[in-house]
Image (tube, rainbow, N blue to C red):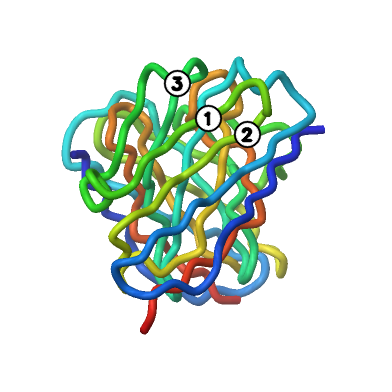
Amino acid sequence: EVHVVESGGGLVKPGGSLRLSCAASGFTFSSHSFNWVRQAPGKGLEWVSSISSGGDYIYYADSVKGRFTISRDNGLNSLYLQMNSLTAEDTAVYYCSRGIGYNGSPIGYWGQGTRVAVSS
Amino acid sequence: AIHLTQSPSSLSAFVGDRVTITCRASQDMTSALAWYQQRPGKAPELLIYDASTLKSGVPSRFSGSGSGTDFTLTISSLQPEDFATYYCQQFNVYPLTFGGGTKVEI
């Protein structure tokens, strides 16, 4: 059974940094692309970033480009999101997600989400 | 970026009603469109992909149609558990984008 679990969320001050992690199991991690999708309180879904199976293709939303870095460790079956220069607009639940196939979308598998709050 | 406009943003309906949600794309995207359901406090769940393919295990009362720029999600007979917010998403090109959501209230 496919399982993805995020961790690393928390409260951080504006301008601070946070690193989210996603542990995956139940499938061949290295064969699949992954995404981070976030949802601000009371708002809709916002795609943040995607990474290909080998890590050679990476995409970012304009809202996070230059501040966030997606990465993966196929040996540890783990996905990461390094978030720097955080602002209040980054406050959201962050979901690690995988496509139903090898591509990142459509997104068939989601974690439970990890909450990030940026506040002084 | 492809912008997705969902309508309506919310609706109220009765159990047994037929409900239709539309998603209009700002440019042609073939059929690379998915629909998700999100219940309060939960992660989204995929319902339909490639505009009209029902994900395995999703009730057959859900259906999708459309191509190009205009897409629809239809719930043929609304059930109490369908109270949720529905999102469309295009995966034709990066950046991936979601519609603004449609909240369905029973």
User: Label 1 belongs to which residue?
Assistant: A72
Q: How far apart, in angstroms, are the residues tagged by discs 2 and 1?
A: 6 Å
Q: Amino acid at mark 3?
A: Gly
Quarter of the picture containing the C terminus of chain A is bottom left
Frontmost residue, A111 versus A99? A111
Q: Is residue B39 above or below residue B26?
A: below
Q: Amino acid at mark 1?
A: Arg
Image quadrant in which you'd find residue A65: top left
User: Label 2 belongs to which residue?
Assistant: A78
Q: Marks 3 and 2: CB-CB under 8 Å?
A: no
Q: How far apart, in angstroms, are the residues tagged by discs 1 and 3?
A: 7 Å
Name the residue furthest front.
Answer: A16
Image quadrant in which you'd find residue B66: top left
Q: Earlier in the sequence, mark 1 or mark 3?
A: 3
User: Label 3 belongs to which residue?
Assistant: A55
Residue B46 lies, in percent from the top left, at 59, 43
Q: Is residue B85 above or below residue A63?
A: below
Frontmost residue, A113 versus B69? A113
Q: Residue at horizontal 30%, vertical 39%?
A: A60
Q: Residue at horizontal 59%, vertical 21%?
A: A101
Q: Marks 1 and 3: CB-CB under 8 Å?
A: yes
Q: Marks 2 and 1: CB-CB under 8 Å?
A: yes
Q: Residue at horizontal 54%, vertical 69%?
A: A10
Image quadrant in which you'd find residue A17: bottom left
Quarter of the picture containing the N terminus of chain A is top right
Label 1 residue SS: strand
